[in-house]
């Protein structure tokens, strides 16, 4: 595996002084995503949000780092995730067998380094894989401006094909939303809502119903959940990568805080910039269950 | 990791395929129903990437021609010698002689390895690097030895172990299987997405009864009843192959180009076989578009996030959407593809033709598409050779 020479971290934007905070925004969207947290053996789960190891892995792949390469300053980036569209869980029943009809090999190797076939012969191996379907996230990475500029370019010209947590989940475009010269939370607060047309209309219809109107209501903002890395945060996640080397994969924990951010919806015309008006019957909305 | 090899230019070959499938159940879950996923808020038919990869792989393995052993060995030899030359600073003849001695234990020219039946093993850049690293610090000393001494010294080195992870061409494309040991360091060059229908799909059930033909008059009723889940869909299938990665996995340009052509054929023509005797669902694609990009692979599934809802001709409406999305992506991001071509069945009086022509050029037969792709990729690899 060859490694491209590191590009000079030239600041292409004169406005990026080294003292200014810089944030790289990524839009993580596609039909399927899978962000494993405690996956092992035959059961491959997914968290409800992209993990730090998944996002850093995507950036390392874009930059062309082989798996064995130390993460270096990639590991020091801080991550914020905004949930624009939570999606739902998909369970995929997945069988594995050799396409030539041979028995599957054993897990271990013989003294010669050869994998012997299983005995008694086992032809099919069942695994269960979980995906998030129809989800959209915005990831914000905070770090040195030079590095983020390089990574922004790398994501647009990746060395390896990129994936949303698993190889079979290619991202849809645009993946990079570019750089912002603000702090992470401001960047996550001000980036318009990235949800699909269907979800946006659903939101407008629901607000209209809650207000007792007979038409959709296009609000100026929507509240989105966010998970922001913060040393003073009150929650701990075990998903910060230490090494992606297959022989010594390791993760460590990181402190995060959870927040709700009111973000601009970006509707063409805004009926009301307050989504939280007086509802007719705030306690019971039978149609919400039907996803109307 | 010291890196002697020049990296080939980044080249991604994207495949976009639209294929209409009649009522079928080609990829089922543990309930026996066709797999599904929600996208854009509606239910879609899904064929998992692993199902179509298996179909592709089976098709591929049946077709890949036997490699000419002598030329393959010469190529491995050349690549390894180059590696040693750069690492140890030897001159070419000495490096060649050393490489020849290192490859001797593999008995490549002596014929096939015993445990490989159909096709040859390839050695990727990683394996050659590992072997070159074995002799890098003693290369000058080794070159000074006589042939017999050199051979015995090489016998002491763990050359075979480094080469034990050679892999056939399909592993270079599709990567390791789940059960393979991590020592086989091959990252798949191909990325295959789950196929999704371009429109909303309902799961339907076929209620069946099986009646015993020899049944006596006293007994009535069916011997067996049940249901088979099925659906019918126009699927969007996407795959991307990194040519630079494939070269890395095979260290052989001709093999890499062959692999891409064969992958294109097998991916386009293969089909999962689930329930095929009940549904006879084998079809050919309505559209195969190949786009070569030097920036990044672009998955165009976003064209169908709003489900296609044509009263008639879902395939044609999907093709128009796909072409428009491709054109939009090119305009919006300013990344013109290096090569684009399409084979499709839409005729002049159907709506999508104009959009398809402006996106991928006029339709050409599939064989011409493969030829054009091969010619373009061979040209794309030229600058690399000039640089060496």
Image (spheres, coloured by chain):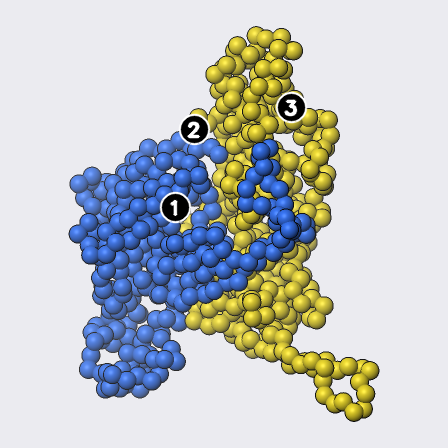
Chain colours: A blue, B yellow
Report in which chain the residue with disc 3 lies.
Answer: B
Q: Chain of mark 1?
A: A
The reply to whether label 2 and label 3 mark residues of one chain is yes
Q: On residue B105, which mark appears?
A: 3
Q: Are marks 3 and 1 in contact (CB under 8 Å)?
A: no
Nearer-the-camera pick, A135 or A182: A135
Residues under labels 2 and 3: Cα distance? 25 Å
Number of numbered discs visible in the structure rendering: 3
Q: Is residue A123 left or right of residue B294?
A: right
The residue drawn where x is 63% and y is 45% is: A117
First-in-chain label (2 vs 3) = 2
Residue B40 vertical position relative to residue B167 in the rendered view, above or below: below
State the residue position of label 1: A57
Residue B224 occupies quadrant: bottom right
In depth, the one of A24 and A252 nearer the eye is A252
Quarter-wise, where is residue B249 in the image? top right
A258 or A18, which lies in front?
A258
Q: What residue sits 71% from the left and 47% below the top? A: B63
Is residue A190 visible in the rendered image? The answer is no
What percent of the width, then of the height, locates residue B217? 81, 91
Point out which mark residue B1 bears: 2
**Which quarter of the rendering shows the C terminus of chain A?**
bottom left
The CA distance from mark 3 to mark 1 is 38 Å
Residue A166 in sight from this viewpoint: yes
* Disc 3 and disc 1 on one polypeptide chain: no
């Amino acid at each position: 595996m060859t490694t491209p020479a590191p590009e000079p971290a030239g600041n292409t934007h004169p406005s990026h002084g080294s003292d200014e905070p810089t944030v790289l925004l990524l839009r993580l969207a596609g039909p399927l995503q899978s962000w494993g947290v405690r996956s092992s053996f035959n059961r491959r789960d997914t968290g409800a949000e992209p993990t730090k190891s998944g996002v850093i892995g995507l950036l390392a792949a874009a930059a062309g780092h082989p798996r064995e390469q130390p993460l270096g300053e990639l590991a020091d980036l801080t991550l914020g995730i905004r949930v624009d569209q939570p999606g739902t869980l998909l369970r995929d029943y997945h069988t594995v067998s050799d396409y030539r009809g041979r028995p599957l090999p054993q897990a271990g190797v013989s003294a010669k380094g050869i994998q012997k076939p299983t005995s008694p012969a086992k032809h099919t191996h069942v695994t269960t894989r979980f995906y998030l379907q129809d989800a959209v996230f915005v990831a914000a990475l905070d770090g040195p401006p030079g590095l983020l500029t390089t990574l922004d370019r790398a994501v647009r010209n990746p060395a390896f094909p990129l994936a949303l947590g698993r190889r079979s989940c290619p991202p849809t475009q645009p993946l990079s939303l570019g750089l912002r010269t603000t702090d992470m939370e401001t960047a996550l607060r001000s980036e318009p809502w990235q949800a699909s047309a269907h979800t946006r209309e659903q939101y407008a219809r629901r607000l209209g119903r809650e207000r007792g109107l007979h038409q959709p209501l296009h609000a100026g903002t929507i509240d989105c959940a966010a998970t922001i890395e913060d040393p003073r945060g009150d929650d701990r996640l075990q998903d910060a990568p230490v090494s992606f080397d297959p022989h010594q994969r390791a993760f460590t924990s990181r402190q995060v805080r959870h927040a709700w951010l009111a973000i601009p919806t970006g509707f063409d015309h805004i009926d009301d910039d307050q989504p939280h008006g007086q509802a007719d019957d705030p306690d019971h909305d039978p149609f919400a269950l039907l996803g109307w | 990791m010291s890196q002697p090899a020049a990296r080939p230019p980044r080249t991604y070959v994207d495949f976009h395929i639209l294929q209409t499938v009649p009522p079928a159940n080609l990829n089922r879950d543990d309930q026996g129903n066709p797999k599904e996923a929600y996208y854009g808020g509606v239910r879609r038919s899904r064929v998992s990437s692993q199902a179509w990869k298996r179909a592709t792989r089976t098709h591929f393995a049946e077709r890949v021609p036997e490699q000419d052993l002598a030329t393959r060995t010469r190529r491995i030899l050349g690549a390894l010698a180059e590696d040693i030359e750069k690492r140890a600073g030897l001159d070419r003849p000495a490096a060649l002689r050393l490489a020849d001695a290192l490859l001797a234990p593999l008995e490549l020219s002596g014929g096939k390895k015993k445990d490989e039946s159909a096709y040859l093993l390839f050695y990727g850049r990683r394996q050659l690097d590992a072997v070159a690293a074995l002799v890098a610090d003693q290369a000058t000393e080794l070159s000074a030895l006589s042939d017999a001494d050199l051979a015995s010294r090489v016998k002491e080195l763990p050359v075979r172990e480094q080469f034990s992870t050679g892999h056939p061409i399909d592993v270079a494309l599709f990567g390791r299987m789940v059960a393979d040991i991590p020592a086989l360091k091959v990252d798949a060059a191909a990325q295959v997405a789950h196929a999704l229908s371009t429109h909303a799909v309902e799961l339907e059930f076929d209620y069946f009864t099986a009646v015993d033909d020899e049944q006596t008059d006293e007994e009535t009723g069916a011997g067996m009843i049940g249901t088979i889940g099925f659906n019918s869909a126009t699927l969007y299938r996407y795959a991307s192959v990194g040519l630079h990665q494939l070269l890395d996995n095979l260290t052989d340009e001709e093999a890499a180009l062959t692999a891409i052509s064969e992958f294109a054929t097998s991916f386009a023509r293969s089909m999962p076989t689930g329930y095929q005797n009940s549904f006879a669902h084998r079809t050919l694609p309505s559209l195969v578009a190949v786009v070569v990009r030097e920036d990044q692979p672009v998955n165009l599934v976003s064209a169908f996030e709003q489900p296609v809802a044509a009263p008639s001709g879902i395939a044609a409406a999907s093709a128009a959407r796909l072409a428009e999305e491709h054109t939009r992506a090119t305009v919006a991001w300013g990344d013109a593809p290096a090569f684009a071509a399409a084979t499709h069945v839409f005729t002049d009086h159907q709506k999508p033709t104009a959009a398809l022509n402006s996106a991928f050029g006029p339709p050409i037969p599939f064989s011409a598409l493969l030829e054009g792709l091969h010619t373009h990729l061979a040209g794309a690899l030229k600058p690399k050779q000039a640089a060496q």
